[in-house]
Image (tube, rainbow, N blue to C red):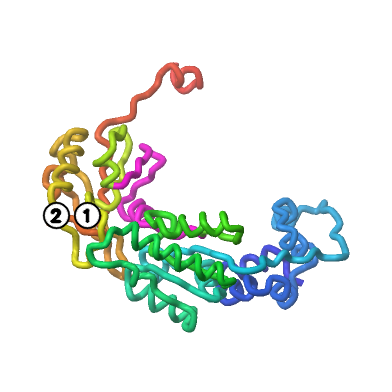
């Protein structure tokens, strides 16, 4: 008989086995010989019972002789997954399993490797959503069409998997909106995490957001609204290369006056000589990331594109609240 710990460890590293489990949980447990207590804990979704088994605690409640039935959702469902920034290595075991188990896979990815991987995992039921983009079309119109396509599959009773580039919840309106609508209409829907550009940035630039804190903001949002920026914290600014443009441009974006306005606003906070980093994560194995140290005053369309993220280190040290520190015994 297999112990729960070994059973879950196998699912963690074997996408084929995890796919079988997603399609037929009870059959997979029986085939792999999972002990009765483990089957009961998984079927009842009991965190307490699972931890009792995983930690090998001796005192356990007796397991009932009759195992509970699995509540199988009727009709369509939705799982949203991410392909990561570098598909080779970033595609998670869970994402692979859901892509394989789906009746329909709809995807919006940024490179041919991700597309090839998805089509290889589910060759007969995969379709790109990229066709909903139109040159010069406002991106929100394209997003709405994508959401409706995803929902049409869910409403048709299909087990639907929607795959998006990077982390599916980071700068991906169709993913969030699809999950929201599916749940509002009574369908099971969930989003699985993926690796985002910010995750890659922390690794490539050696940034620990716990040291100085880290603010994260989209470039057009920063430009349009009166945000309070803490310059003792790091700042990650997304979509610098499309600032001020809400349309889709396959051949690159004309930043016009938006980027100079953005740079001016940053200089007002940090000064012209403050060094920032234009960053682009590596999308293919073996290639280095693009990391360009640059003074804020020198940022121009020459140095940024649609994939650029701007990282701005803190300008000043943190200010200690001495009364709070004294109350906590950190200072005298």
Give the label on residue 301, or none: 2
The structure residue drawn at horizontal position 54% and vertical position 64%, both measured from the top left corner, is 78
Task: Tell me the quarter of the picture where residue 271 sits.
Answer: top left
Between 186 and 2, the one lying in front of the other is 186
Q: Which residues are magenta?
A: 192-218
Where residue 176 appears, as percent x and y from the top left, is: 46, 55
Q: Residue furthest bottom?
A: 124
Q: How many marks?
A: 2
The structure residue drawn at horizontal position 21% and vertical position 45%, both measured from the top left corner, is 276
Between 108 and 82, the one lying in front of the other is 108
Where residue 290 appears, as percent x and y from the top left, is: 23, 59
Q: Is residue 304 magenta?
A: no
Is residue 299 positioned above or below 117 on the image? above
Tell me if label 1 and label 2 are in contact, CB under 8 Å: yes
Q: Secondary structure at mark 1?
A: helix
Where residue 304 appears, as percent x and y from the top left, is: 19, 56
The structure residue drawn at horizontal position 41% and vertical position 65%, both measured from the top left corner, is 146
Q: Is residue 210 magenta?
A: yes
Answer with left or right where residue 267 lies relative to residue 165: left
The structure residue drawn at horizontal position 38% and vertical position 45%, both measured from the top left corner, is 208
Residue named by callout 1: 241
Where residue 135 appears, as percent x and y from the top left, is: 23, 66
Is residue 299 positioned above or below 1 on the image? above
- Mark 1 Cα shell of 10 Å, populated few (<14), some (14-19), many (≥20): many
Answer with left or right where residue 220 lies relative to residue 177: left
């Amino acid at each position: 008989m297999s112990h729960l710990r070994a059973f879950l460890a196998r699912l963690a590293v074997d996408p084929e086995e995890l796919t079988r489990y997603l399609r037929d949980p009870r059959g997979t447990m029986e085939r792999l010989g999972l002990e009765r207590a483990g089957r009961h804990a998984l079927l009842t979704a009991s965190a307490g019972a699972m931890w009792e088994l995983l930690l090998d605690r001796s005192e356990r409640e007796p397991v009932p002789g009759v195992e509970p039935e699995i509540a199988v959702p009727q009709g369509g469902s939705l799982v949203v997954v991410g392909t990561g920034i570098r598909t080779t290595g970033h595609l998670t075991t869970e994402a692979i399993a859901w892509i394989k188990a789906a009746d329909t896979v709809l995807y919006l990815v940024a490179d041919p490797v991700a597309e090839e991987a998805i089509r290889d995992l589910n060759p007969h039921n995969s379709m790109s959503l990229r066709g909903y983009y139109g040159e010069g079309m406002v991106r929100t119109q394209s997003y709405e069409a994508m959401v409706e396509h995803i929902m049409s599959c869910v409403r048709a009773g299909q087990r639907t998997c929607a795959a998006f580039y990077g982390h599916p919840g980071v700068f991906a309106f169709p993913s969030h909106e699809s999950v929201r609508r599916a749940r509002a209409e009574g369908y099971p829907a969930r989003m699985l995490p993926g690796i985002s550009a910010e995750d890659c940035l922390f690794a490539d630039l050696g940034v620990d957001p716990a040291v100085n804190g880290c603010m994260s903001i989209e470039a057009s949002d920063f430009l349009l609204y009166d945000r309070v920026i803490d310059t003792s914290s790091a700042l990650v600014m997304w979509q610098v290369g499309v600032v001020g443009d809400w349309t889709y441009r396959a051949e690159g974006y004309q930043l016009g006056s938006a980027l100079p306005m953005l740079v001016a606003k940053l200089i007002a906070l940090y000064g012209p000589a403050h060094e920032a980093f234009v960053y682009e994560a590596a999308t293919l194995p073996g290639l280095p990331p693009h990391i360009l140290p640059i003074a804020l005053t020198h940022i121009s369309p020459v140095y940024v594109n649609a994939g650029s993220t701007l990282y701005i280190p803190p300008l000043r040290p943190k200010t200690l609240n001495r009364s709070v520190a004294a109350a906590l015994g950190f200072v005298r």
